[in-house]
Amino acid sequence: MELKEAILGRRSIRQFLAKQVPEKTIKEILKEAVWCPSWGNTQPWEVKIVTGPVLEQLKKENKEAIVSGKDPAPDIPMPENWPVPMKKRYANVGKRVFDSLSIARNDKKGRREHYADMFAFFDAPALLLFTTDKRLAVEYSLLDIGIFIQNFCLLAYERQLGTCVMAAAIHFPEILRRLCSIPDDQRIVIGIALGYPDKKHPVNQFERERIPLEDFVRE
Ligand SMILES: Cc1cc2nc3c(=O)[nH]c(=O)nc-3n(C[C@H](O)[C@H](O)[C@H](O)COP(=O)(O)O)c2cc1C
């Protein structure tokens, strides 16, 4: 597959087929994705592959936590405010997701169910959790891990796999530490839901947007 095809074709997947991803495949992707730049080649990431009964328990507890109104306490604080253009883009993607699922603006129950589903990682058959040593400067670790995860998503796409990078996976680190044996000295950065995409599902088909060049390139 051409690199450009992978970059343009990858999209966030929010509905997966009930088909397991072989651990061997996940490890092959990780072995390739690790060939990314990082500050001073520090490679400051650790990755937990979560599948099977542990993942099912994690989906259950993460979902229960959000549904019961538990206060999130992520290791990486969630952004609370966005300048107007970003806020608009954020709202737009939310609208497209809800429209594709035929959930109306005033359908509170439908919206709640979608969020609950999101906190169960859209029922993906695998979840990858990326962590980094808490002693490291957080900004550069995040940058390094960001580069790694894009490699991961593209390499997964090349193998017909779907991914969704998920902040919703890391709202409740206490649950992740307990169920996935992540030590306290690791900062939990991000999760990636992984599985075979249900390509025909509308939530995986809506049109996506990107800003035009003149909106982000300054002469
Ligand atoms: C750091 C980060 C966190 C994200 N968290 C979520 C999430 O919790 N739930 C979700 O549905 N999508 C999440 N996404 C996916 C974005 O919504 C998606 O990447 C964006 O809308 C662009 O769409 P595309 O990935 O299909 O190109 C996240 C993406 C990133 C990079």
Image: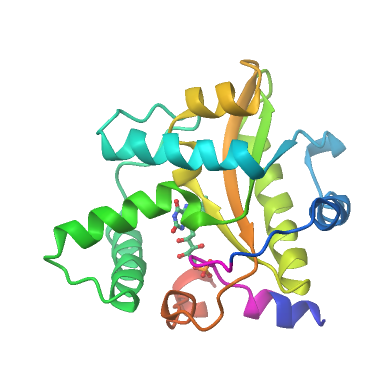
Q: Nearer the viewer, residue 21 or 183?
A: 21
Which quadrant would residue 186 be assigned to in this image? top right
Q: Nearer the viewer, residue 49 or 140?
A: 49
Residue 73 spot, x, y in % from top left: 40, 26
Colour style of the rendered protein structure: rainbow
Main SS class of the magenta portion in the image = loop
Above or below for 150 versus 131? below
Residue 106 spot, x, y in % from top left: 11, 65
Q: Nearer the viewer, residue 89 or 58?
A: 58
Which quadrant would residue 195 be assigned to in this image? bottom right
Quarter of the image with the N terminus in it: bottom right
182 within the magenta span: no
Above or below for 146 versus 171? below
Residue at image position (47%, 76%) is 210
15 within the magenta span: yes
Q: Is residue 209 visible?
A: yes
Q: Which stretch is magenta? A: 7-17
Residue at image position (68%, 53%) is 149
